[in-house]
Image: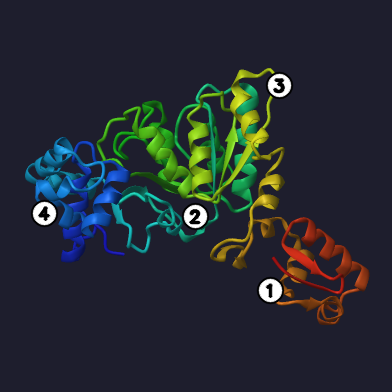
């Protein structure tokens, strides 16, 4: 993939990158307004070229924002940003780049530009967000380490926000398990926040990626973090919340997950524990209660696209990660069309009771369904 760290850059792509970076610097133009501008004008270049009167016809764009777009166009400082990215190995991804995460493209307001340190990987399609309070208890940290580590060992990429508390514990557990992890920042990728996680960020870069839609040197601003949370959930098949008080920012990630059609999971805590009030509310509202990694794997449905990431096998459902060799063999013999159990027994050359017992396991894991008792098919 051509990117701005390369010696040669496709001229058309560079022009589009420059336009997106210029628009990103316009005060008041966040993800939603940027999407409205693209819907109205077709591209960032066209939006930047539009006169103020045309800009103000876009819902949400007033005189002040229209003037900010003009100001960004005249004093963008894009050359300095590009040089900074080249000097520090920051990759710049546009929505149509091959490396841009496919899952993010399905969300309502995908980032126009992603700044990446490290590398995104096709395996990251099998990702789960693990988030929670910055003020974690010993119990919460223990659960984050246990669950994130188990999921990472199972083949999941762990996505979180590099914050203190649960986020940091989840990233560290994924790294310790030898798995991949992605940190989504509310600041620029060259201005890690909190600063005490600089070393953790470097470890993540070596074993995954640190990403942000903010300009590389952007400082953390409170209002950016809720926007950041939509990227955390957008990269993931689901969001697991571990310890969240009633007004925790982690709950906004869960809300984004619901809006994006992702699954929501929550770990319960003590009934009188302040740090778990938000988790208990999520469970009351229908989130899956999680006691172990198996609860997550069993709940997630079929993947939109198969992921060939686990021991060279094509994985169509995260629950397949849990299967032993015999269960994998039986599942591989079952298609999306009705498959006779008698045919299965004959094709597999296995004793009938063994096949029936394995089918029961696959059904419990929601990988197959029975059709009238005499046939089965993949979910």
Locate the N terminus and report the quarter of the image it occupies: bottom left
- Judge the density around disc 4: few (<14), some (14-19), many (≥20) Cα neighbours within 10 Å: some
- At 21% from the left and 42% from the top, the residue drawn is 61
Q: Position of residue 69 (x, y in %)?
A: 14, 43
Label number found at residue 49:
4
- At 45% from the left and 49% from the top, the residue drawn is 208
Q: Earlier in the sequence, mark 2 or mark 4?
A: 4
Q: Relative to residue 265, is residue 362 drawn left or right?
A: right
**Residue on which disc 1 sits:** 336
**Residue on which disc 3 sits:** 271
**Local SS, label 1:** loop
- Judge the density around disc 1: few (<14), some (14-19), many (≥20) Cα neighbours within 10 Å: few
Q: Is residue 209 above or below residue 67?
A: below
Q: Quadrant of residue 316?
A: bottom right
Alpha-carbon span between mark 3 and mark 2: 35 Å
**Local SS, label 3:** loop
Task: Please identify, in this view, whether the residue under mark 2 or under mark 1 is nearer the observer.
Answer: 1
């Amino acid at each position: 993939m051509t990117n701005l760290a390369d010696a040669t850059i496709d001229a058309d792509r560079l022009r589009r990158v420059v336009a997106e970076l210029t628009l990103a610097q316009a005060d008041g133009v966040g993800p939603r307004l940027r999407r409205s501008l693209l819907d109205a004008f077709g591209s960032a270049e066209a939006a930047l070229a539009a006169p103020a009167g045309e800009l103000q016809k876009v819902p949400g764009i007033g005189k002040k924002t229209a003037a900010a777009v003009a100001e960004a166009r005249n004093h963008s400082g894009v050359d300095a940003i590009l040089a900074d990215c080249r000097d520090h190995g920051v990759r710049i991804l546009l929505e149509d780049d091959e490396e841009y995460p496919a899952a993010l493209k399905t969300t309502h307001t995908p980032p126009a530009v992603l700044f990446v340190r490290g590398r995104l990987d096709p395996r990251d399609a099998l990702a789960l967000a693990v988030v929670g309070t910055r003020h974690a208890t010993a119990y919460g940290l223990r659960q984050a380490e246990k669950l994130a580590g188990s999921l990472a060992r199972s083949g999941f990429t762990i996505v979180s926000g590099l914050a203190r508390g649960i986020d940091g514990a989840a990233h560290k557990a994924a790294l310790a398990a030898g798995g991949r992890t992605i940190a989504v920042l509310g600041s620029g990728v060259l201005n890690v926040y909190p600063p005490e996680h600089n070393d953790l960020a470097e470890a993540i870069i070596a074993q995954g990626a640190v990403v942000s839609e903010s300009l590389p040197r952007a400082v953390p601003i409170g209002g950016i973090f809720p926007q950041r949370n939509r990227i955390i959930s957008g990269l993931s098949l689901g969001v697991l919340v571990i310890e969240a008080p009633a007004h925790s920012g982690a709950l906004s990630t869960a809300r984004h997950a619901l809006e994006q059609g992702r699954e929501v999971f929550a770990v319960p805590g003590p009934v009188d524990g302040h740090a778990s009030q938000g988790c208990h509310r999520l469970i009351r509202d229908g989130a899956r209660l999680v006691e172990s990694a198996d609860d997550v794997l069993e709940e997630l449905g079929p993947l939109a696209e198969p992921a060939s990431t686990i021991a060279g096998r094509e994985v169509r459902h995260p629950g397949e990660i849990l299967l032993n060799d015999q269960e994998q063999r039986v599942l591989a013999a079952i298609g999306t069309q009705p498959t006779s159990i008698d045919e299965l027994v004959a094709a597999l050359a296995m004793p009938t009771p063994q096949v029936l017992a394995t089918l029961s396991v696959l059904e419990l894991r929601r990988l197959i369904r029975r059709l009238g008792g005499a046939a089965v098919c993949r979910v």
